[in-house]
Image (tube, rainbow, N blue to C red):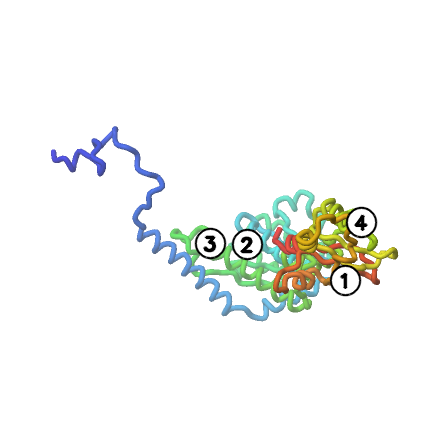
Amino acid sequence: MTRAATTGTTGAPAGAGAAPADRGATSPADPGALHVGRQTLADEIAALQRLHDGLDERFVAAAAALAGIDGGKVLALGVGKSGLVAQKLAATLRSAGLPALYLSASDSLHGDLGVVGPRDAALLLSKSGATSELMTLVPHLRARGVTLIAITGTPGSPLARESDIVLDGSVEREGCPLDAAPMASALVASAIGDALAAAVMRARGFTAEDFARLHPAGALGARLTLSVADVMRQGEELPRVLEGASLKEAVLEITRTGYGAVCVLDPDGALAGFITDGDVRRQLLQIDDIAAVPVADVMSRAPLTVTPELPLSQALLLLEQRKKALMTAPVVADERCVGLLRLHDAVRAHLPS
């Protein structure tokens, strides 16, 4: 037997004593996997194109039914993979401003029908159109006056025949090598939901501000809904001294709050001036006794100020759009100093949560 047949690439004997293969090593690409992956995507793209080309007046009717809901809600129901799509569909419609919720088809038969009202519309998702749980529910939903909208891969199915509006979610191939697992059909059903949500948003005049109000914790919500008053430092957190104070007193107040600045106020609470830690450092290069220096000799008498009602996004631009960004700015309302805006707070409010 030759040496090559009895040793591995390191020269160690082959067989039981050989070192295990490195699990992190890159193995040659499987051309079969690449072909299958591309075929799956091709099938899904074809299914979406077929859906795109086939949208008709039935889609318009479904969108109108959802957009016209007044005092009711949208119920999304499905079983298995269709149930997962229904959950996503309900969440998307809520983002579009519609009261929508996912109902478990099986649980609804055991008490959850109490949430159903006569002004509701139900989106029933089923590839086969013959899902037993949905078919059992249909007469109960119908008895409550619910508008039934089926999203099914079988337009001539029992579910389709019992529904008021039928949206065709059929596909030619699933993308599964066995043409069995609901891949393309689940994608198509989800896409129908997205298209309905978009149409409803347009019909109801849904704006970016409306979206932001429903997503207050997101960056868009912060940009469109927060004002300076929502993040400014006020009350005991507002660093302030009277205009008769010394620079030493100002430094102590800057140190107390740690915000790098102090507002100088007159006896009526109006802003007389503003001192930053940069102003203090420049003074320390010239004098030794800061207790002998009045704040009036150091403060900026016309600093950048903002108002409490100013949108936070605009205030952020005011702070940043300088040759050297400002770290703080006094907040003034009716000539009174009511707070301090920090660049750090404004930026943090705009970060995604």
Label ID, residue 301: 1
Nearer the observer, disc 2 or disc 1?
1
Nearer the observer, disc 1 or disc 4?
1
Query: Disc 3 or 2, which lies upstream in sequence?
Result: 2
Q: Nearer the viewer, residue 251 or 56?
A: 251
Q: CA distance from mark 2 to mark 1?
A: 70 Å
Q: x and y percent of residue 197 in the render? A: 61, 62
Question: According to the image, label 2 marks what residue?
Answer: 126
**Whether label 2 touches label 1, CB < 8 Å:** no
Judged left or right of residue 192, residue 272 is: right
In the image, residue 23 above or below residue 138: above
Q: Nearer the viewer, residue 11 or 173?
A: 11
Question: According to the image, label 3 marks what residue?
Answer: 183
Query: Disc 1 or 4, which lies upstream in sequence?
Result: 4
Name the residue at 78% across, 50% down. Answer: 292
Query: Disc 2 or 4, which lies upstream in sequence?
Result: 2
Q: CA distance from mark 3 to mark 2?
A: 13 Å
Name the residue at 14% across, 35% down. Answer: 3
Determine whether the residue tagged by mark 4 lies in a helix, strand or loop: helix
Nearer the observer, disc 3 or disc 4?
4
Callout 4 environment at 10 Å: few (<14), some (14 to 19), or many (20+)?
few
Q: Nearer the viewer, residue 260 or 320?
A: 260
Question: Which three-letter amino acid code belongs to the residue tagged 2?
Answer: Ser
In the image, residue 12 above or below residue 106: above
**Figure quadrant of residue 286:** bottom right
Q: Nearer the viewer, residue 348 or 260?
A: 260
Query: Disc 2 or 1, which lies upstream in sequence?
Result: 2
Q: x and y percent of residue 151 in the render? A: 56, 59
Name the residue at 36% across, 54% down. Answer: 36
